Image: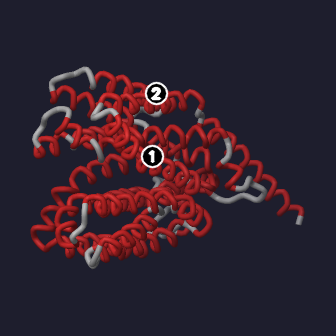
Amino acid sequence: MRASRTRHGVVALAIGLAVLSYIQRVAISEAAGPISHDLRMTKQQMGLVFGAFGLSYALFEVPMGLLGDRLGVRRVLLQVVLAWSSFTALTGAAWNALSLYAIRFLFGAGEAGCFPNLTRMLSGWLPARERVTAQALMWAFTRWGGAATPPLTLLFIRLVGWRWAFVGFAVLGVIWCAVFFLWFHDDPGKHPSVNPAELELLETSRALTAHRPGEAHWLSLLLTPQIAALVLQYFCFSYVWYFYITWLPTYLREARGQSPERAATLAMLPLLFGGFGSLATGLAPRRLPRRAIAFCGFLGTAILLFAFLRIHPVIPAMIAMGVASLSSDLTMPISWDACFQIGGSYTATVAATMNMLGNFAGFIAPVVGGVILERTRGDWNLLIDTMVGAAVVSSLCWLYLNPESAQRQRKKGAGSALTRIGAESLSH
């Protein structure tokens, strides 16, 4: 019997939600001008609004991951997507800076449940050979979705105004929830479209994401050296990546003498290139060791950023930075699949912990950049040198990280547990 392909629909749902989450979170950057004008907000107040999302997103990552592991992806994702879509719509109802800050903080708390639970969803619904490919597709489309959001938001604002634009983005979330509610099941075995051949294909993934009697507490898992290395490499990755979506346009104007329009266009390159990096890993042959790809990807990022500072023509320099982004994004599917390989039944919790540290880096990186620029009177080279150092640290982490070994140990544990349960059943 040929296996059914219901799991491909799950991948499509995951990609759709990932892109939607990026559209809804990035839209406010393009709407900042009219929002500040209508609500009479200063740049400092707008900066606090931007920070509200990142702060709550980081704080609620682990709680949202734990909920997904305990209650199931279907229940948690339905609730959080409806919640954050509601706060997206309420963004259009803000009447002053404080109300907008509160709305965006709550919006970030809802979105914190997105990627940890999507990772658990894909882990339970895909065999090993397809998980990295699915993660690659998801992250490639989120990068491209983020790059396309500013012109899309600008179009919406010109057509209906910024307030109704956020309502329109919220409606997209409600539509996704309706499709998800009617079609998705946590357990592939309960989905009417899954045939026995596909269920057999997914049996190992289902076993590894199921909770077993006597397994270690989630907190003990988070305190292991493997998890420490995993979150450190992602923190350093995010430290570099957040430069592309915060300081890069300013750098291009001040250090490279570009016009605002040209700087905005050039600043899209790291996101566009990064999407191709994620996709390349997903399409790479399985025989290529993922640890080696991650190590070389981060090392390549460090070398290319070092070279970027020494390339004077703007276009070649930005191509070098784009390829640096591509190199680090080679690791994105690998890092998120490692959450399943190491976390097993606590996949969402491990993914939430990793993403929490990544978002703290997103809070720290712009602040560190501002301090460096202020104290050195605009020494951009020193700021980018810290990014080179962060990329080197990420590469060194992958000399220690071994998710494949962790997964093999989990498979042995799962097999022993199933054997023990079977023996106990026979004895009774």
> Of 24 and 120, which appears nearest the observer?
24
Q: Residues within 10 Å of mark 2 (few under 14, many from 20)?
A: many
Q: Is residue 421 left or right of residue 220?
A: right
Mark 1 — residue? 361
Q: Secondary structure at mark 1?
A: helix
Q: Is residue 5 left or right of residue 23?
A: right
* Residue 141 rendering spot, x and y as whole percentages: 31, 50
* Residue 254 rendering spot, x and y as whole percentages: 19, 37
Residue at the right extreme of this rendering: 427
Q: Residue at x 18, y 62 (%)?
A: 33
Q: Is residue 24 above or below residue 305?
A: below
> Of 307 and 406, which appears nearest the observer?
307
* Residue 379 rendering spot, x and y as whole percentages: 30, 31
Dot 2 amino acid type: Val
Mark 2 — residue? 392
Q: Residue at x 41, y 67 (%)?
A: 105
Q: Is residue 40 left or right of residue 200?
A: left
Colouring method of the image: secondary structure
**Label located before the other in sequence (1 or 2):** 1
> Of 427 and 304, which appears nearest the observer?
304
Q: Which of the 4 quarters of the picture holds residue 7? A: bottom left
The answer to whether residue 198 shows anywhere in this view is no
Dot 1 amino acid type: Ala
Q: Is residue 95 above or below residue 377?
A: below
Q: Secondary structure at mark 2?
A: helix
Q: Which circle, 1 or 2, is nearer the viewer?
A: 1
Q: Quadrant of the C terminus?
A: bottom right
Q: Residue at x 48, y 63 (%)?
A: 113
